[in-house]
Amino acid sequence: MPLEENMEYAIQVQDVSKVYQLYDKPIDRLKESLSLSHKSYHKDFFALNQISFQVKKGETVGIIGTNGSGKSTILKIITGVLTPTSGEVKVSGVISALLELGAGFNMDYTGIENIYMNGTMMGFSRKDMETKLSDILEFADIGDFVYQPVKTYSSGMFVRLAFALAINVEPEILIVDEALSVGDVFFQAKCYRRMEEIRKNGTTILMVTHDMGSVIKYCNRVVLLNRGHFVAEGAPGKMVDLYKKILANQMEDLEEELSAENDFSGEILCQPEEETVPEKSSLLSSKKEDETRETSLKRENHPEEKNRQAEKDLMKDHLTINPNRTEYGNGKAEIYDLGLFDERGNLTNLLLKGEYFTIREKIRFQADIQAPIFTYTIKSKMGEELSGTNTMFEGTDIHSVKAGDQYEVNFRQKMTLQGGEYLLSMSCTGFEQGEHTVYHRLYDIANITVISNKNTVGIYDMESEVKATYQPGDVSYVESC
């Protein structure tokens, strides 16, 4: 039965199959084509087998599954790159696809020429693309290389331009296939922010990713595939749990769960925890209980500071700093230097899980401030605030300052986040006439790479102590059997 036009849906997929003919030897293809008896020399491989689902307009839907499940194949069929062997797909809206970044680029054309050419392929006039050009170039941030042939680009510049083009043409439908893992950590963070913006603006998003954090954070619903077959569809948390059973080869448990409950359209079972601001009293009590987690603030006359001044350079010169950071404030204070120190006192972006590290901020003041507050926040690449604190939460004694004064702030804590890439933000704020005031804030100023030889489940490690006691069976009972 053919699909009917339904204005509620941006994408409708009905009974779609994709079959490839596999031959043991190249000569078998010729034998089959010349066979008078129509003898078959091939085996049918179902990349997709009777797949059906719908995506409502303005919805964000994820497709997950192991490698070889057919995730990328279904996206290529929806975008028209592949033709289904059977079944039907209806799409309502202009699609911008991030499948294979840069597919469709002419390597001999310049970046600018490829932007216009791809815009034309997506149905935009040259005048339309001229209005979007500044946003695309600003997002890509590859400088004058945009006027050079793309064959001269590094892989990083290539994917930055391709992503910037695809995500800044204001698509009605955005289709993403693992594209958010490209570029450095700062570019990935910018991509996630842009994804969040267009999602909130009502763009329909269909995404394939192996990042289950992205699935739970962004998706309204998730479709789970396995070896070309539709397994289930429903709330992200539940689908991720089912996916883990597939990864663990717990197929019997999965089938039992599917037969017992075949409707997963209810509430998300793995909701991200709400971000709450800890009460001051709880932080103070925690501080008293664990004296190793201390926040020390010291004036410029500290001996270590004198040694650093003698080096005549800044701490941040030895770190990877985000060149495209966002910063703002009223200018009454300036965070003019920052550092990340591992447990051995090395200035580095690389930190070992399980060791103590120090975040250091140096602030100078351009005006009198009664009670400045110093902060730091560690976020994921997707912009989730994972950890952080400030001098007010910690109950640290902060003096009022006058123009020309300086503060050095040291936050020392243990790294319990899992191995991976994170982003550091910091600020100097306060309250003036009861209103929260930002003197200087640095968003995503530096990356933190956590090295780990043991990752556990989730965002951070609870540092469990495991004790297992072995009890041998009754030998006499075993022998009698």
Image (cartoon, grey):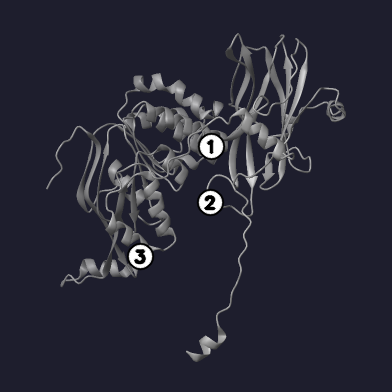
Query: Would you call the spot at circle 3 few (<14 residues within 10 Å), some (14-19), or many (20 or more)?
Result: few
> Which quadrant would residue 106 be assigned to in this image?
top left
Where residue 251 appears, as percent x and y from the top left, is 36, 63
Where residue 351 appears, as percent x and y from the top left, is 68, 43
Would residue 101 be visible to someone looking at this image?
no
Q: Which residue is mark 2?
A: 457
Q: Amino acid at mark 3?
A: Glu
Q: Which residue is mark 3?
A: 252
In what element is the residue under mark 3? helix
Q: Mark on residue 141?
A: none
Residue at the spot 50% in from the left edge and 91% down from the top edge: 480
All told, the count of numbered labels is: 3
Q: Which residue is mark 1?
A: 381
Query: Would you call the spot at circle 1 few (<14 residues within 10 Å), some (14-19), or many (20 or more)?
Result: many
Residue at the spot 51% in from the left edge and 86% down from the top edge: 478
In what element is the residue under mark 2? loop
C-beta proximity under 8 Å, tags 2 and 3: no
Instruction: Pick whichever, 32 or 76, lies toward us.
Output: 76
3D distance between C-alphas at marks 1 and 3? 36 Å
In what element is the residue under mark 1? loop
> Which quadrant would residue 206 be assigned to in this image?
top left
Q: Nearer the viewer, mark 1 or mark 3?
A: 3
3D distance between C-alphas at marks 2 and 3? 23 Å
Q: Amino acid at mark 2?
A: Val
Query: Would you call the spot at circle 2 few (<14 residues within 10 Å), some (14-19), or many (20 or more)?
Result: few
